[in-house]
Amino acid sequence: MRFLLPELRTHLHGGGPPPWTGYTMMQTSWQEEEEKMAGDAEQPVGPLTRAATRTFFGAPAVDDLDQLKARVGFIGVPTDQGVIIPFIRSGAFAGPRLVRETRTRLRETRPDGTSAGWFDIETERHYLEGVRLADCGDVLIAGGDVQLSQARTTAAVRKIAQRGAMVVAVGGDHSISFPVGRGVAEAHGMVDVVHLDAHPDFADSIYGSKFQHGSQLRRLHELPTIGHIAALGLRSVDRDQYEDMKRLGVSFASTRALLEEGPKAVVDRLVRPADNLYVSIDIDVLDSGLVPATTLPEPGGISYRQLRELLAAIATKGQIAGFDIVETSAAQADLATAMTTAWLIIHFLTAIFEAEPLLRHNA
């Protein structure tokens, strides 16, 4: 279903039972789920990843995460287990494949295994040249078992981060931010989070589920390894989630604030300097006309250039320990959306490495 009726949109964001009868909610104990999730994150979960047929941006493939030697470790998380079917369209599981299949100017690897980089005509400069990239494959998703899939995701991400690489996770639906962010935080000890999204994803539960793409930011907030959270670009927000964010100390800014104040001013006001930052990018933070093949497009979003400015400002606030980019969907085949996602990864990586000298100077 491409567009939601208003009453469905309200219920999607935590506004009560569905507007029809005969629907039985899952009755689950949050305490039991929490204990199982914590246990699953520590227990052996079998094979973690499998190689992809193509790699992100021509990066060398790495089969053994324990042997990873790279500055940037890409990992695909091909799942839409967190999408609340049938209320909105699925298809985000294909996101990693779609991004790998795009052809950008960042696509060549030198014989020594480092990136050949890319040239930007706007600045007349070459970027990411000599940076060692690696494609760590896709998380092995356990069909029908969300908790096992998330445990594998956390374990794989933790390995990548412990090897000293910045994690770049390509989803997949936005529920992946919980296990990915958890893995990054476990490797680094403590991280602050910046959430870029049209939606807050701060529901305690939706239709009885605690682990889906409308509550992952709430789950991250509950982790002891997560510090300050800032949510930017919001424009479709349930009142209960708005009140919960205020009550629980989440800083946030609407799309209107970004447009009126400017991205850098909002980042300076709400994103605190931190040793380690984890950034989550839902591409629906962009205006719906730019990303028609996202899971839940919303009108009135920011432009691509405004998002680039936002990411560049965030990169100056601390070391980016990892980031995810999510909700590129195959439900409506669209090359432009996949290309937008791919270039966002390139432009954010460029901003991160450009900010490194400033961060070292300020340390």
Image (spheres, rainbow, N blue to C red):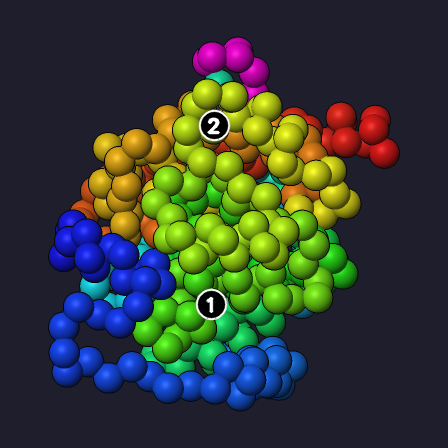
Residue 204 badge: 1
Where 337 sits versus 48, above or below? above
Would you say 266 lies left or right of 55 here?
right
- Cβ–Cβ under 8 Å for marks 1 and 2: no
Would you say 144 lies left or right of 147 here?
left
Residue 244 badge: none
- Kind of residue at disc 2: Leu
Q: Is residue 103 visible?
A: no
Q: Position of residue 217 (x, y in %)?
A: 51, 58
Q: Residues within 10 Å of mark 2 (few under 14, many from 20)?
A: many
Q: Quadrant of residue 107?
A: top left
Residue at 37% x, 40% y: name it.
235
Which secondary structure lies at badge 1? loop
Residue 196 located within the stretch drawn in magenta: no
Q: Position of residue 26 (x, y in %)?
A: 33, 84
Q: Nearer the viewer, residue 297 or 78?
A: 297
Residue at 34% x, 58% y: name it.
13
- Please provide the residue range marked out in magenta: 121-127
Q: Is residue 253 visible?
A: yes
Residue that badge 2 annotates: 258
Q: Nearer the viewer, residue 336 or 199?
A: 199
Would you say 56 lies left or right of 88 here?
right
Q: Nearer the viewer, residue 70 or 290?
A: 290
Residue at 39% x, 75% y: name it.
209
